Image (cartoon, grey):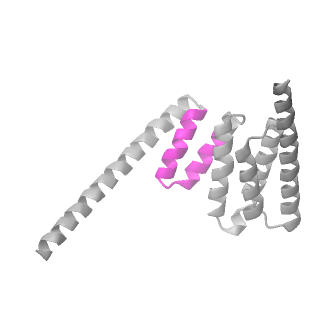
Amino acid sequence: NNNNNNNNNNNIEIQIQKKNQLCLQFVSEAIKFFESKFIINQNGNIAMFLHKLYQIDNNNVKAKQILLKAYEIDPNREDIVATCLNFLQIYLIQQPFEKRQSDIELLTKMFQQTIQNYKNNLPNWFFASYSQFANHLIQDKQIRESILIQIRKLKESKAIKDSENLNLKKI
């Protein structure tokens, strides 16, 4: 009876492996397909979809490249900006210290650009993302402090603007 169980377990293992194989095959076919689409039509939706596929494929290098491309195409689209700012941090954390500096500078620019683009209308996810960046990726204590102060000021001016908008609606 024990032997029978082992056989069943092995069969299940083999079935799972076959399914995983099929999934990976499907993902790599999908990647090829969407990469060719993206060459013809460089649009944000295709880029975002490719980003998901690269993640499934565990290809952080390509995932990062396509995110930067998406940001280049549409730096004002909120889902692209949010995905960029959040996932670039994740990819950054996975790199060794000595390789992080240029990405930290790039992310710093992207956060500043987002602040410019949104003026006083920053979405709430932005504050969480920027705080996380400051706290986890900025080694220099003074720079970290100045970012956290900037975040606090931005939150305050957003709160003021939000309450002004509420008051206008009441009138």
Q: Which residues are magenta?
A: 44-70
Residue depicted at x 73% and y 46%: 126
In the displayed structure, would residue 105 be above or below residue 80?
Answer: below
* Residue 60 falls within the magenta-colored stretch: yes
Quarter of the image where the C terminus is located: top right
- Relative placement, left or right, of 131 versus 34 is right
Left or right: residue 45 compared with residue 93? left
Q: Residue at position x 76%, y 56% from top?
A: 131
Q: Is residue 158 visible?
A: yes
Image location of residue 75, percent across then percent down: 71, 36
Nearer the observer, 169 or 42: 169
Residue that protrudes farthest toward the bottom in the picture: 2
Q: Residue furthest top?
A: 171
Residue drawn at (74%, 57%), measured in percent from left and top? 133
Q: Residue at x 66, y 59 (%)?
A: 92
Residue 113 x/y as whole percent: 80, 42
Residue 102 found in image quarter: bottom right
Q: Residue furthest front?
A: 170
Count of marks, rendered view: 0
Q: Quadrant of the N terminus?
A: bottom left
Residue 132 in the figure: left or right of residue 149 = left
Q: Is residue 120 visible?
A: no
Is 49 above or below relative to 170? below
Q: Is residue 105 left or right of residue 63?
A: right
